[in-house]
């Protein structure tokens, strides 16, 4: 179903192909019918193994055949001595390996191999590890094989250090090594149990590859971690000089700067985000949202230092709101001149809010402006509030007296003045 | 990045100096939606019962039927399919244990049990099978650690967690399983990048991410997802051609227009990909001659990629297609009729 190129060919080539396929189809149908007949008849013998073998080699996704094969093997077990059972299943492993050569990504094959190992009197985990090594050397991204390897490692007691060394070798020799990085991310915590809130620390060698995923934790930065990250930041900045359009570098620098000193690096961070949007325009929405998040975080940090109850982030290209749960004590919010589309439900947490300024955005939805007991004044000039129903939530804000809705499409609604005074009778100063 | 470009024999693949695997969309590739051709393609598919691909894919027939019917319904063409024949077929596929197989003579499995229940939901005929037995079958596949096996042979995979809860949700019977443990198992498959794999420790993969976010939506646990982190991993699937791959360093494939896009929709981050570029990629995967969609431009079409191409376009807002539900990959109007509207993150 995947990767089958549509190839144009002559009429004669088409005819030959058609005949070939017809022949193959007949053979398949005949073998399939024979197998299913045998199974219905309850026959669990060598012939069943032969017939299923034929079919499974080129049709390993025909799951029912693996099931039948297992039934036959279980039946044969009952009449054999332990050493014969060992041979029976070793031969089965041989067969599975042949199938894997044809289709290394068949769920059925890999599962059957795992199953066989549960039936083998003496599994050979060294051999299984060798199979994994070979398979991964052909395709380092084969997740079936990696999953199988994890089972083999667990059963045979291979050490974490050994597996880390294995990933080292692969990462060093192969560009497409995400699977190895992923595996490392599960191995490292076993060596160095981490505190609950931390994220993965960058490893120095990560930077040697262009494609890397690096999430740096902020909380509880020890002196040790801090100097490692500082060194990383230096390396990244050097790389950036060589490759100023390298988005991975830019993003890593931003994350490192946030981990080290979010407020001190704010200006640089904004500049890098701008470059990111130019270098990687497909994801500009992501960068805008991420930048918004960081600006909000910085503003919250500044508030904490100054103990203010005013949250002001006007004219900052904000595209999204977050961390509203950290603004529970805020009395005044200014979000004017941004690119917000909505005031999300979490806004309703701002139980101390008295004044909201959110002019010059693109706000269509005020879902979050409900049951705000202290809210007295709201300014939403030049937004995208279109219908009377968009304003319904405001009726639950019982202290609201001043509302500015100038420059919103809603003013075109018929009888808007009377409709609004009915909806919001307590509002005395209404501007449309 | 400036780098060397080269084309493979079929003119499709680029291997850049920095080794970004991708395809090149030829200027003559389709750029308008050919809905009628796709409807004709699906309506005729499987009518030639001696077709090679068709016969060899018998092991997944129930899912094949679900793909065909769903895409026809999304295009408003469900009436062209043979409802009675399909319902009889499904009845013949329910086994004594309650589970449903892909086709007659094949063994039951969770994958095909879900597909069958989805088909019967489309047709509002869920009671032609023994629903209680289906519920027992699904319940019986839950393991001690909360995971689900695909069938009695014990393969564990988060795909099956999704199949289990989706099946039970469609039947209104989510309460029969151990929900806490089921959720615990899925969460134990969450990785450093915010994504999910088949089993604990498995690498993140868009297909598994779709299953796990779908699972968490159905079970009301989406707050457990790190939406910003996962959303980033997902939007990084978009390649210069506009197409989406399933994980880093892989080629784009139209079916990821579903797995990735639906996941983004579920976690409220669909605006993080470039919609226009993705739409052009999906449209380029159409075959103007035969109808249907292929995995990538120029390849052979099949019903699987046809469904996910059309469903992807629906999620992107194409008004010629019915709205599709991102969790169940079924028309929204069907789920509204059933009364099933799982929460999504905003």
Image (cartoon, coloured by chain):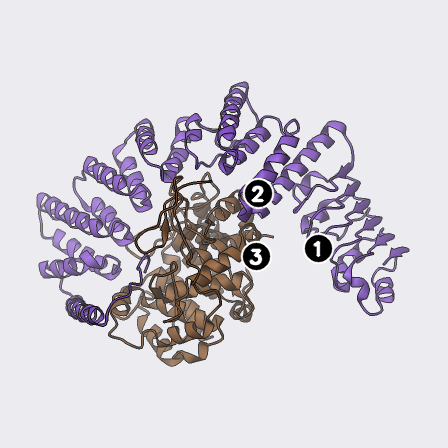
Q: Is residue A19 above or below residue B252?
A: below
Residue A301: where, in percent of width, then height? 69, 31
Q: Residues within 10 Å of mark 1 (few under 14, many from 20)?
A: some
Q: What subunit carries mark 3? A: B
Secondary structure at badge 2 equals helix
Foreground mark, 1 or 3? 1
Q: Secondary structure at mark 3?
A: loop
Q: Position of residue A401 (x, y in %)?
A: 87, 52
User: Which quarter of the picture shows residue A312?
Assistant: top right
User: Element type at marker 1?
Assistant: loop
Asked whether residue A333 appears in the rendered view, the answer is: yes
What label does residue B178 carry, if any?
A: none
Q: Nearer the viewer, mark 1 or mark 2?
A: 2
Q: Which mark is residue A367?
A: 1
CA neighbours of label 3 inside 10 A, class few (<14), some (14 to 19), many (20+): some
Residue under numbered circle 2: A278
Residue drawn 29% across and 52% down? A107
The purple-tinted chain is: A
Marks 1, 3 in one chain = no
Examine the rendering and report whether any part of residue B134 can be seen: no
- Is there CB contact under 8 Å for labels 2 and 3? no
* Residue under label 3: B343
User: Mark 2 — on which chain does it sit?
Assistant: A
- Residue B18, position as x, y percentages in the image: 40, 39
Q: Residue at x 79, y 56 (%)?
A: A394
């Amino acid at each position: 179903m995947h990767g089958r190129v549509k190839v144009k060919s002559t009429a004669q080539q088409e005819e030959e192909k058609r005949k070939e396929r017809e022949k193959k189809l007949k053979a398949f149908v005949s073998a399939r019918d024979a197998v299913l007949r045998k199974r219905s008849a309850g026959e669990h013998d060598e012939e069943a193994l032969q017939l299923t073998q034929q079919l499974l080699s080129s049709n390993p996704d025909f799951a029912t055949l693996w099931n039948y094969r297992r039934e036959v093997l279980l039946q044969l077990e009952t009449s054999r001595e332990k050493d014969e059972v060992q041979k029976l299943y070793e031969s089965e492993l041989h067969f599975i390996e042949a199938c894997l050569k044809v289709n290394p990504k068949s769920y059925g094959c890999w599962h059957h191999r795992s199953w066989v190992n549960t039936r083998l009197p003496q599994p050979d985990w060294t051999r299984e590890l060798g199979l994994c090594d070979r398979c991964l050397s052909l395709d380092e991204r084969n997740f079936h094989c990696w999953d199988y390897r994890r089972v083999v490692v667990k059963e045979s007691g291979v050490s974490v250090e050994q597996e880390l060394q294995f990933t080292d070798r692969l990462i060093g020799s192969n560009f497409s090594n995400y699977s190895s990085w992923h595996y490392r991310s599960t191995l490292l915590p076993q060596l160095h149990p981490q505190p609950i809130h931390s994220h993965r620390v960058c490893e120095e060698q990560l930077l040697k590859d262009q494609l890397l995923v690096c999430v740096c934790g902020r909380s509880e930065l020890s002196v040790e971690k801090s100097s490692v990250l500082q060194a990383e930041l230096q390396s990244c900045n050097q790389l950036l000089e060589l490759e100023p359009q390298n988005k991975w570098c830019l993003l890593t620098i931003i994350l490192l700067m946030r981990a080290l000193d979010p407020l001190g690096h704010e200006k640089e961070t904004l500049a890098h985000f701008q470059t990111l949007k130019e270098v990687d325009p497909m994801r500009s929405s992501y960068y805008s949202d991420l930048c918004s998040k960081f600006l909000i975080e910085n503003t919250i940090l500044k508030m904490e230092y100054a103990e203010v109850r005013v949250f002001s982030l006007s004219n900052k290209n904000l595209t999204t709101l977050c961390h509203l749960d950290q603004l529970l004590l805020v009395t005044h919010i200014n979000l004017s001149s941004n690119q917000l589309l909505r005031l999300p439900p979490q806004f309703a947490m701002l139980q101390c809010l008295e004044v909201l300024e959110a002019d010059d955005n693109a706000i269509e939805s005020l879902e979050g402006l409900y049951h705000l007991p202290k809210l007295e004044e709201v300014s939403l000039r030049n937004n995208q509030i279109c219908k009377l129903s968009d304003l319904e939530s405001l009726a639950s804000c019982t202290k609201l007296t001043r509302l500015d809705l100038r420059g919103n499409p809603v003013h075109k609604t018929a009888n808007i003045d009377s409709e609004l005074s009915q909806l919001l009778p307590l509002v005395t100063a209404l501007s449309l | 990045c400036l780098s060397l470009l080269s084309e493979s024999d079929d003119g499709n693949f680029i291997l850049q100096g920095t080794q970004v695997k991708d395809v090149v969309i030829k200027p003559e590739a389709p750029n308008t939606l050919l809905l009628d051709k796709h409807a004709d393609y699906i309506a005729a598919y499987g009518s030639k019962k001696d077709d090679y691909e068709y016969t060899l894919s018998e092991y997944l027939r129930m899912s094949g039927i679900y793909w065909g019917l769903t895409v026809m319904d999304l295009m408003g063409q469900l009436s062209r399919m043979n409802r009675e024949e399909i319902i009889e077929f499904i009845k013949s596929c329910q086994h004594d244990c309650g589970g449903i197989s892909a086709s007659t003579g094949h063994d039951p499995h969770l994958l095909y049990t879900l597909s069958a229940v989805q088909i019967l939901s489309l047709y509002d005929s869920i009671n032609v099978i023994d629903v209680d037995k289906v519920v027992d079958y699904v319940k019986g596949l839950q393991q001690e650690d909360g995971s689900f096996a695909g069938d009695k042979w014990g393969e564990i995979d988060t795909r099956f967690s999704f199949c289990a809860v989706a099946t039970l949700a469609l039947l209104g019977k989510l309460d029969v399983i151990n929900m806490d443990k089921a959720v615990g198992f899925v969460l134990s498959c969450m990785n450093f990048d915010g994504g999910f794999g088949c089993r604990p420790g498995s690498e993140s993969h868009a297909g598994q991410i779709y299953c796990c976010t779908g699972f968490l939506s159905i079970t009301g646990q989406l707050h457990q997802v790190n939406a910003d982190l996962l959303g980033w991993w997902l939007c990084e699937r978009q390649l210069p051609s506009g197409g989406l791959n399933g994980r880093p360093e892989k080629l784009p494939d139209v079916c990821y227009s579903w797995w990735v896009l639906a996941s983004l929709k579920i976690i409220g981050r669909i605006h993080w990909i470039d919609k226009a570029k993705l739409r052009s990629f999906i449209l380029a995967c159409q075959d103007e001659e035969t109808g249907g969609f292929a995995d990538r431009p120029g390849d052979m079409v099949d019903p699987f990629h046809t469904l996910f191409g059309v469903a992807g376009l629906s999620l992107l807002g194409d008004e010629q297609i019915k709205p599709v539900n991102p969790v169940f990959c079924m028309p929204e109007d069907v789920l509204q009729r059933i009364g099933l509207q799982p929460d999504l993150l905003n």
